[in-house]
Image (cartoon, rainbow, N blue to C red):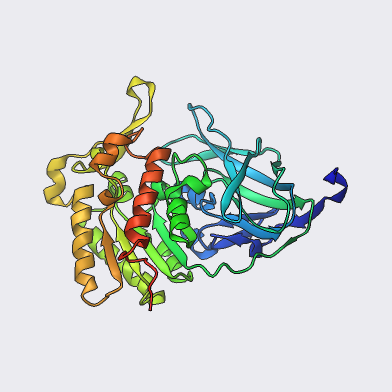
Amino acid sequence: MNTEHYTITTPVTADMLRGHLDVEATAHGLLPHRLPARARRQIPDNQLAVAEAQPSGVRLVFRTRATTIDLDTLPTKRVYRGFPAPADGVYDLLVDGRLAAQATVAGGNVRMITDMFTQSSELSEGPAGTARFTDLAAGDKDVEIWLPHTESTELIALRTDAPIEPASDSGRRVWLHHGSSISHGSNAAHPTAIWPALAAAQGGVELVNLGFGGSALLDPFTARAMRDTPADLISVKVGINVVNSDVMRLRAFTPAVHGFLDTIREGHPTTPLLVVSSILCPVQEDTPGPLAPDFDGGTLRFKATGDPAERAAGRLTLNVIRHELARIVEQRAAEDPNLYYLDGRDLYGEKDYAEFPLPDEVHPDPAGHRRIGENFARLAFGGGGPFATKTS
């Protein structure tokens, strides 16, 4: 049957979204945000401003009998001057929880990053486009469209060959997670293949992902956003950005961690709260930052530029941070029985590095994301883990 005569257009509304904290009305439609407006007004740099508007973990959720679904969007793609343009971001369509189709949207705006360190940029406007999904199974089904984790996405409208209706409440627990670019999904192949999405699927929970590339820096406005977000489970992954940006010393780090956790606890006094240290990253294990790009050999890699001898003066490395996080959690857990610590090397350690090396010495490849997701699901959601389902 030719369904073009039966197309139904539905504007995208905020109540169709999951995994976001805010939406912004634009000239084209809705732009999902992963930080609320109050927090966005306090962002001090372009890096986080871009990262939080990239909808990692954000998805459209609805129920329909449609076999053809078009999602009209206006993407904004980030390109670094002097580097090839990245591939178009991927839209994952899940039917009843299983990946059924994928699409991309060509064109859109281009944000050219002119300085890698300051993240200063120039914006060139482009046309909207359509992510099209066809030949879907007939019959009523729950549909999720996971938005690209690598580009911001203004949502304009849905066009379907059958009506859509709100999805019912899944009844699943909500997992609120904060972390760095690895949690954001750097180098993952598509949005449901980032490690938090993989772990959430295995754990049977609803993900709210506050993984921000380059920006897991114990910012108070992020802690307040987490405090104010409903959640049944919370995790905070800390370390790599603090070291590779060289933003503080041990004297400042310790009270910053306490303050971050105190703020979360103001809104979630008894929620299971898991503090996770960094995965293995050999270039930063015992060498302080800042991190610098290294183009030797024509491939982008990163190297630490600090002096290991300065650890005695409070310069931070991943091993210093792991030791301090473990000490802080042990101290606080005496009065907070729902606070836990997980060493990130249990998610990705020396054996994993030997099997799936970090291509740029910092970020895992798609196979690395799978390994991290599997290990987190086993250690956090598995039997005896801090996020395991409690039975009466």
Q: Looking at the image, which residue is at 18% across and 43% down?
A: 286
Percent x, y of residue 169: 59, 69
Percent x, y of residue 217: 35, 55
Quadrant in which residue 11 is drawn: bottom right
The image shows a total of numbered marks equal to 0
Q: Quick one: 373 or 219, which is closer to the camera?
A: 373
Q: Is residue 70 visible?
A: yes
Q: Looking at the image, which residue is at 13% across and 50% down?
A: 313
Q: Looking at the image, which residue is at 36% across and 77% down?
A: 269
Q: Quick one: 56 or 146, which is closer to the camera?
A: 146
Q: Is residue 251 visible?
A: no
Quadrant for the C terminus in the image: bottom left
Horizontally, residue 344 falls left or right of residue 98, namely left
Horizontally, residue 187 falls left or right of residue 362, namely right
Horizontally, residue 44 falls left or right of residue 277, namely right
Quadrant in which residue 359 is drawn: top left
Quadrant for the N terminus in the image: top right
Q: Quick one: 123 or 277, which is closer to the camera?
A: 277
Residue lying farthest to the right in this orientation:
5
Q: Looking at the image, which residue is at 60% across and 42% down?
A: 76
Percent x, y of residue 166: 68, 65
Percent x, y of residue 297: 34, 20
Asked if 278 appears above or below 264 in the picture, the reply is above
Residue lying farthest to the top in this orientation:
297
